[in-house]
Image (spheres, grey):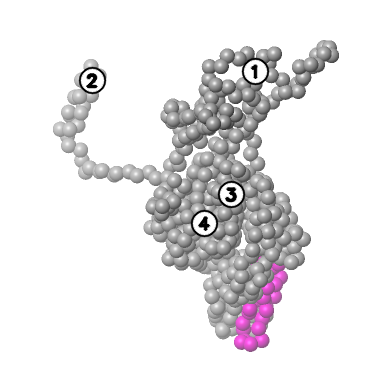
Amino acid sequence: MPVSFSNIPSNWKQPLYWVEVDPSKAGLPVFRLPALLVGIKLSTGTAAADVPIPVASGAVAEQLFGKGGHLTAVCKAFFKVNASQETWALPVTEAAGNAATGTITFNSPPTVAGNLDLYIAGQNVNVSIGATDTVNTVAVNTAAAINALLDLPVTAVAAASPSGAVTLTCRWKGSSGNDITMQDTYYKGIGGQQVPTGLTIAYSNPTLAGGTGVASFTNAISNMGEMDAEFVCLPFTDATSLLAWETEFGFTDSGRWGWMRQKFGSIWSAYRGTYSSIIALGQSRNSPQVSVLGVEPLSPSPVYEWAAAYTGKAARGFTDDPARPLQSLQLTGILPAHTQDRWIVSENNTFALNGIASQRTEADGVPMIARESTMYQKNLYGYPDDAYTDATTLATLARLLRNQRQAVTSKWPRHKLADDGTRFGAGQAIVTPKSIKAELVAQYRIDEFNGLVENGQAFKDNLIVERDSNDPTRVNVLYPPDLINGLRLFAALAQFRLQYDRGVNVVASTSQIGSIG
């Protein structure tokens, strides 16, 4: 019986027409590629800690993780740039430590009425100021205005002493609260934003301070099991947190990029700091699956919202095309530092050389991705290496390997293996090294057509498919894809003239006429 059936038995004798359906030649790869947003839940949230849960909107996040909470803000920032991705969240409990605090002090009273536009964690807090208000009155009204905005990550108290002081306290414990910023009149006169005449303000720091402790991810990562998590937003850049997630997404046997699990995925984050501290962070890691965006110290938006927006745009871009660079994609909803406080191009270039992704802001005032560098910089011997410099590399590899896996598992789920040259009947469920190679080349041509790879002939020449000499049931494949590259640089030599030599022009013209004739 040359045709290999999977369901109709060879000893079936009942007439007449029996058919089994085989989808092995019809299916195309389908990828979910969900995002996973990691963060701290408040005690008011209804979600269980350390257990992944699907999230569809900011309103749902408020209920699950608490209004004004860390993970709630992460979800909202993500949905501002990517509302179509399948999105899950992984809530963890706050650290066993202290909550971050900060102080706003009004040192002198106003002399005219007006409005004060405070910005707490990048969110506007409008305070009505009366011409006869004392500094204590301004402080009380400011605290009330802050507490009325339940989306803010802080609560406020007008202190009895010193006079005119407002103390802000983060809603959760841990060092992540130290990134919450305090400033005023972000738009500097645009739309009437200005501090009322006479009123003077002092801030204890540009950000809250004193938050201690880092959440543990041991149980959370364990509870993920084998769920898909293609784009992980990790708004934590301490060494302990990064190591835990790098291990989970590593290339070892137990890692998601390892041969046993084949889950793949990437980790996206952001870090606020000085120029030198950001470089130091980059030099401290060597992770091809992690991309950390460098953020200026005076950006009003908290770093966990930067991380969420970066993840959202990466997920949206790579879901459509994993080989296409993310450069120029805008991080909508994020407030950049003012022009004089932003990184300059040479600083961004140094970030890229030290494993830090970069961003910049142009005339429209919306920050955008400049280069999605990963933290990988050196090979196993510690020498500089660019194999995984750009996040597109692993994203493209993941797509190729999934395409190949879908083809192999769909077309040869129960096949027999024979040597090349074996004579068997048409329709038999048999494959040979040569037929496998032909299928891999055909798949590569499809990937080439879809803009993931190039140089199909070179791939075919270097592809090796062989039967294992010690295990006759095993096929070994050397798969050498040539990944397509992004257009990162356009370098032009502007070799100008004040006027071309007329003799050269005449010679050129004569030569051209001669060739035509």
Q: CA distance from mark 3 to mark 2?
A: 64 Å
According to the image, label 1 marks what residue? 428
- Residue 292 bears which disc, if any? 4
Quadrant of the rendering where the N terminus is positioned: top right
Q: Nearer the viewer, mark 2 or mark 1?
A: 1
Q: Are marks 3 and 2 in contact (CB under 8 Å)?
A: no
- Residue 255 bears which disc, if any? 3
User: SS class of the residue under badge 4?
Assistant: strand
Q: Observer-nearest residue: 130 or 297?
A: 297
User: SS class of the residue under badge 2?
Assistant: helix
Q: Position of residue 75 (x, y in %)?
A: 66, 56
Three-letter residue code for mark 1: Gln
Q: Nearer the viewer, mark 3 or mark 2?
A: 3
Three-letter residue code for mark 4: Val
Q: State the image quarter where residue 193 is shown.
A: bottom right
Q: Which residues are magenta?
A: 141-167
Q: CA distance from mark 1 to mark 3?
A: 38 Å
Q: Are marks 2 and 1 in contact (CB under 8 Å)?
A: no
Q: Position of residue 254 (x, y in %)?
A: 60, 49
Q: Earlier in the sequence, mark 1 or mark 3?
A: 3
Q: Are marks 2 and 4 in contact (CB under 8 Å)?
A: no
Three-letter residue code for mark 3: Gly
Q: Residues within 10 Å of mark 4 (few under 14, many from 20)?
A: many
Q: CA distance from mark 3 to mark 4?
A: 20 Å
